[in-house]
Amino acid sequence: MSVHVACRLVVIEGNDRGRSLAISPREAVVGTGAGCDLTLTDSRVSAYHLTISQDYDGAIIVRDKGSTNGTWYQGKRVQEQVVPLGASFLVGKTAVRVEPDAPMPAALHDTERTLTPTGPITVRSDLPYAEARLAVLADFERTYLAEVLQGAQGDLGVAARAAGIDVERLRAMLHEHGLPVYGPAHGRDRGDR
């Protein structure tokens, strides 16, 4: 079982601004219907508009339940979407955001960071453009992964959510870049206990 961050769905714009709902493994219903876990007063929201849950690996899953006006994430209408912490989406004219219940470590909460590579990034002009570009991106990816893992104090579950990727994908990427998953510099994957 992975350790994951307790989250809330918070109304950030609209008639019901400030209302919120704890996100758990049980699917919670959001809509205008009387039986909803989070009842909204927006006339463009369907009675049982969407469900939201957090699986045991920490992934936050939003599912539109066939609403009339849709659930919109990053400008696209979605039926089912895994969203990261901090994700905002529209339900009718209401904007909601997934927020941690407790403050995140500062390193994970920053939306803008300056990454300091472990060494200079070498641009290989002896390679064709596409290959040189991939080499630079690989350097960036390695530095990014190391920074996110360090900010999560070595917790792979927290780091994966901060990066917006699956824990197993993160583990594979760390291995691919030769970054340790265990050890004093990166802590232990607490989800393996």
Image (cartoon, grey):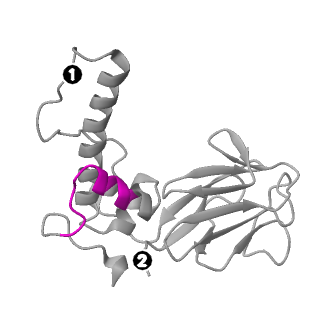
Which residue is pictured at 25% across the width and 65% down the height? Answer: 181
Q: Residue 84, percent across and down?
A: 51, 56
Please say if 141 is above or below 183. Answer: above
Count residues near mark 1 (Cα–Cα under 10 Å), then give few for <14, some for 14-19, many for 20+.
few
Going from the N terminus, do you reach mark 1 or mark 2 first? 2
- The answer to whether one can see residue 23 in this image is yes
Q: Depth check: 61 or 68 in front?
A: 61
Three-letter residue code for mark 2: Ser
Q: Is mark 1 on a helix, strand or loop?
A: loop
Q: Which dot, 1 or 2, sits closer to the camera?
A: 1
Q: Distance between the residues labelled 1 and 2?
A: 38 Å
Q: In which quarter of the image is the N terminus?
A: bottom left
Which residue is pictured at 75% across the width and 54% down the height? Answer: 79
Please say if 145 is above or below 7. Answer: above
Which residue is pictured at 47% across the width and 60% down the height? Answer: 166
Q: Is residue 176 left or right of residue 65?
A: left
Q: Is residue 73 left or right of residue 71?
A: left
Q: In the drawing, what numbered circle is on residue 123? A: 1
Task: Write down the quadrant of residue 39 in the picture.
Answer: bottom right
Q: What element carries label 2?
A: loop
Count residues near mark 2 (Cα–Cα under 10 Å), then give few for <14, some for 14-19, many for 20+.
some
Which residue is pictured at 80% across the width and 50% down the height? Answer: 70
Q: Residue 187, percent across and down?
A: 20, 70
What is the count of numbered marks?
2
Q: Residue 49, percent across and down?
A: 80, 61
Q: In the drawing, what numbered circle is on residue 42? A: none
Q: What stretch is highlighted in magenta?
A: 170-182
Q: Residue 14, percent across and down?
A: 69, 52
Q: Depth check: 192 or 76 in front?
A: 192
Q: In which quarter of the image is the C terminus?
A: bottom left
Magenta run includes residue 173: yes
Q: Mark 2 points at which residue?
A: 2
